[in-house]
Image: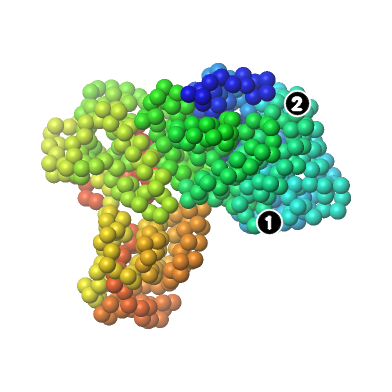
Amino acid sequence: MQIFEKNFLGSLELKNRLFSAPIKTGYGQRVTDRHIVYYDSISKGGVAMAYVEPISVSLSGREHPKQLRLDSDEFIPSVKRIIDTIHSNNTLACVHLNHAGRAANPKVTSGVVFSSSEISCPSTGATAREMTKDEILKTIEDFKNTAIRVKKAGADVIEIQMGHGYLVSQFYSKYINRRRDEYSDPLKFANDVMDAVKAAKLPVIIRVSGDEMVERGLHTEELKDLLRLVENKGAIAIHVGMGNACVSPAFYYHHMFVSKTFQEESLRKIRNLTSLPIIAAGRFGDPERLEKALNEKLADFFALGRSLVADPEFPNKMREGKTDEIVYCGGCLQGCLAKVKSGEGLGCIVNPEVGWTGKFEKPKDHKRIAIVGGGPSGLEAAIVLKKRGYEVNLFEESEKLGGTANLAYIAVGKETMKKPIDSLVKKALRYRVKVSYNSKFSDLNSKDFDLIISAVGSSPIKLSVPGSENVFQLTGHEYFSDPQKLKGAKKILIVGGGMIGIEAADHLVDSGKVVTVVEMLSDIARDMEPITRTLTLSRLNKSGVKVFTNTKLEKFDGNHAICFVEGKEEDIGEFDAVVFSVGVKPNPSLIGSIKIGDAHTPGQIYDAVHSGFETALKL
């Protein structure tokens, strides 16, 4: 395969065309053991070059309280630990440098947020003030000094962030940059930064956004002058992503709802704007897509981000023709983006070993363990126990493993979630977990096992509403199990505005139904990942879905729904069917068994997998 042929990037010899992307870990300002474990797994997995996560050149440009630092010499040994780890696995190391500008987090910059001109950042809610001339010169000097520290830490390459709505692009953007001094020239700041980082005497890659995908944002054609500048200044490659961190985060994070077509169109245009090699980033964690993109000359190299978080061995498995063994990313952002933002640090819904510093301890004596339930928590527990050397029998009451997680990819735009669920199932079977299908826990003879784990999941709570017998009713889970059940209904009432209720509303509207949602609390979709929530609610708003918050369904009068809306009784209309999505409760478990996943505490896929992982480690 051409992907795995040796290549050169400038003077750098590369063993293949795959890199790891600069993923934020949120593990700490100084390097921790979690960092080392993460970078060790990534660089062992077969990439030719591993990126060290984004590092701000100045304290004023930081995005996260646990963002890795290199803004003074005291941090050189810390970053060197990562680079040495990467090099120990015969992999090149590139350090990604940035200053967030208006996208900086005011909570970690002592309230100081600045940009080329005064402008707000919708993602953070902060308004940046215009930089003074002295601050501009200080920031350029910071780029220079940090680049020199990168060299001292032993890196092979430096990457400068000049896109995605960060500081350099805030000078290049004519919409943002309204200065009246020499830095009103959109190229001057980028030019001065390029000159500054040359002091490190390292090859330089430039990162840009192929298209910010927003009105008054930077579009592909407008990059022509910037690309010409950096090429003339000696850059060795252009690393291309999409979107803007402040105003189009869905494209910036390559959310699963976003069509790949926009990215491919942008890459084709950029190919005509520069003669430099192109590194493409964003949802290339698919062997077929990688080969196709290379054959079509969309890019010369590819940076894999979340796909390596899900499976660091992705490149090795692809090279060895073992693509069926790859654990695939679904693009949900639950474990990566959401966990970094929450302060927990980088994680994954299907790879709980990300940043894990422990070891799989062998059992002191031979034990036979039964796991009841083949959903995500049961599967993960089975995998870990097999790794540790236990004899594991898994009992699943249906004909298919995966549990209710198999409903996750039925929702609109979430088709990609099928891959990680299927990957988890295949992984358990590769570990030769013995599975008994169509088996309930009542069929289990507890005397045959030393320990029983209940991973029996949860069931939807069903409300008893007076008069509801006059209207066809089902739960959100029942709907996603068989959407055809509402084929004949036209007007649907959804009771409960959490994730499942909102996804059901989205799915129903997409199939041509008229939908109304009632929610007792003051807000809806509180349990959804933020970007997913924003995009989903935008679709519902455009589709004309009626949403009643602070509203309780009181009764049905015939097929009319009578509710308390803001404390007042109101008839909100007539309906053919009602979908109840008001939460779940754990299913009954065997007495004396260990409960995991939803059987212990209902949550999302991330919670279920990590519950199975952590419990299996403790046995």
- Lower position in the chain sequence, tag 2 or tag 1: 2
Q: Secondary structure at mark 1?
A: loop
Question: What residue is pinned by disc 2?
Answer: 200
Sort mark 1 into few (<14), some (14-19) or many (20+) by Cα contacts within 10 Å: few
Q: Position of residue 290 (x, y in %)?
A: 49, 33
Residue farthest to the right, as pictured:
181
Q: Which mark is residue 472?
A: none
Question: What residue is pinned by disc 1?
Answer: 216
| Along the viewing direction, whichever of 270 and 168 lies nearer the viewer | 270
Q: Which residue is at 29% across, 39% downward?
A: 378
User: Relative to 313, is 161 on the left or the right?
Assistant: right
Q: Is residue 22 above or below residue 538?
A: above
Report the amino acid beneath label 2. Answer: Ala
Tell me if residue 141 can be seen: yes
Residue 513's quadrant in the figure?
bottom left
Q: Position of residue 233 (x, y in %)?
A: 77, 31
